[in-house]
Amino acid sequence: MGEMTTIAAWDEQGEIPVYIATPEDQTEAAIIVIPEIFGVNAGIRKKCDDWAALGYVALAPDIFWRFAPGAELDPDVPEQLQQAFGYFGQFDPDLGVQDIEAAIRWLKHEQAVDKVGLVGFCLGGRMAYMAAARTDIDAAVGYYGVMIDQMLNESHAISNPLMLHIPTADHFVGPEAQAAIHAGLDDHPKVVLHDYAGLDHGFAAEMGSRRDEAGASLADQRTQDFFAAHLS
């Protein structure tokens, strides 16, 4: 089990709430878990606990800490889903990259790890792409990342491994956006794309009605193998 704590923001102006789960034995690698638009809820905390059980320090930052600290939302509750969409509109992804930089710095200094990976979901999937392009993250994985098709001009800056999981029936990332992502990234030497035929956005959520067990298990195993290869 993990716990909530805080880490210093990149500019030292404020403290970012984070959930951190640590393995029983000393480790040299960590994984940052970037949530969906629903905050550091029970599902995200479980993902951190699962990574810790596999031997990684796992840290999930509260990405909405500047305007809605502590938010935990359930996508199966319509009112909370609408609230989450509102938070998405308020979120500044450039500041989100700074928060990732702060997490990398904290993990390397305070947890003494050599390598840091990142896995993100939905909005967090977009942040995984941005982290690969803008930071020195050692490896990144994005699940059903939104708006990546609008940021393909940054792909030249990706210098460390990136994996993207793309459900083909994603009602937030449509066929044209998916085609653009493939056209822009299929030939990139650092990027691996996996399609999941017929699956929708949120298929790898730990809890709730969106989860597809077979698809989630396949994607999660690919993610585990990816990090084992690039963070060891």
Image: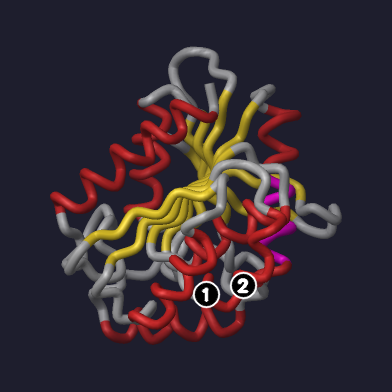
Tell me the quarter of the picture where residue 204 sits: bottom left
Q: Is residue 75 left or right of residue 119?
A: left
Circle 2: residue type: Met
Q: Which residue is mark 1?
A: 149
Query: Are the residues at dot 1 and dot 2 in contact (C-beta closer than 8 Å)?
Result: yes
Q: Which picture quadrant has residue 89? A: bottom right
Mark 1 nearby-residue class (10 Å; few <14, some 14–19, many ≥20): many
Which residue: 52% across, 75% down? Answer: 149
Residue bearing mark 2:
151
Asked if 27 appears above or below 156 in the picture, the reply is above
Whether residue 191 is visible here, answered yes or no, is yes
Per the rendered image, the range of residues in magenta is 95-103
Q: Compared with residue 138, is residue 114 higher up or lower down, i.e. above or below? A: above
Three-letter amino acid code at the position of disc 1: Asp
Q: Is residue 14 left or right of residue 117?
A: right
Secondary structure mostly seen in magenta is helix
What whole-number distance in Å separates the C-alpha atoms at marks 1 and 2? Answer: 6 Å
* Residue 99 in sight from this viewpoint: no
Name the spot of residue 198 as percent of width and height, x first.
17, 69
